[in-house]
Image: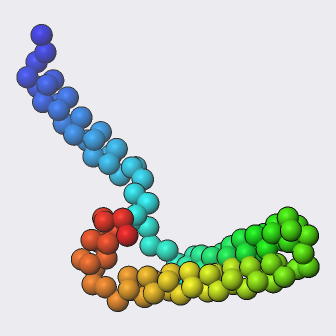
């Protein structure tokens, strides 16, 4: 069979392999800390998305009803307001995350908020 020294060496080898495998595993996405540039781009994209959705809805309704660009203007303004509101919500979320103690932020990440 196997020698006791061989089984001990095998156990040590397996422990070293498992230790090295643990170093290479990627961190979960939730543990990433984003830079200020990333957060700024997020807010810009939210604003542009609101504008684009409002513009698309207005253009579609104007095309459907054959009207002047009444709906286009109305829905573009509504999209702008929605984008600003979403940006403000994101800024508030970022501010709360920065003000929270480390334990509270971890709880928020674990809860998926």
Q: Quadrant of residue 36?
A: bottom right
Q: Quadrant of residue 109?
A: bottom left
**Number of marks present in the image shown:** 0
Q: Can residue 41 be seen at all in this image of the molecule? A: no
- Of the pair 47 and 8, the residue shown nearer to us: 47
Seen in the image, is 61 located left or right of residue 109?
right
Give the answer, above or below, for where 49 lies relative to 82. above
Residue at (17% x, 32% y) in the render: 11
Q: Quadrant of residue 2?
A: top left
Residue at (63% x, 76% y) in the render: 46
- Of the pair 70 and 88, the residue shown nearer to us: 70
Give the answer, above or below, for where 48 lies relative to 4. below
Residue at (90% x, 75% y) in the render: 67
Locate residue 78, reporting x and y percent. 69, 83
Locate residue 5, reporting x and y percent. 11, 25
The residue positioned farthest toward the top in the image shown:
1
Locate residue 38, reporting x and y percent. 58, 76
Give the answer, above or below, for where 25 lies relative to 60. above
Image quadrant for the C terminus? bottom left
């Amino acid at each position: 069979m196997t020698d006791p020294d061989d089984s001990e060496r095998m156990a040590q080898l397996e422990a070293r392999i498992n230790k090295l495998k643990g170093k290479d595993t990627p961190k979960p996405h939730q543990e990433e800390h984003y830079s200020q540039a990333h957060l700024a781009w997020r807010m810009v994209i939210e604003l542009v998305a609101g504008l684009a959705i409002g513009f698309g809805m207005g253009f579609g309704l104007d095309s459907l009803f054959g009207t002047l660009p009444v709906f286009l203007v109305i829905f573009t303004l509504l999209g702008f307001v929605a984008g600003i509101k979403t940006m403000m919500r994101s800024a508030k979320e970022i501010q709360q995350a920065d003000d929270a103690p480390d334990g509270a932020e971890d709880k928020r990440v674990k809860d998926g908020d």
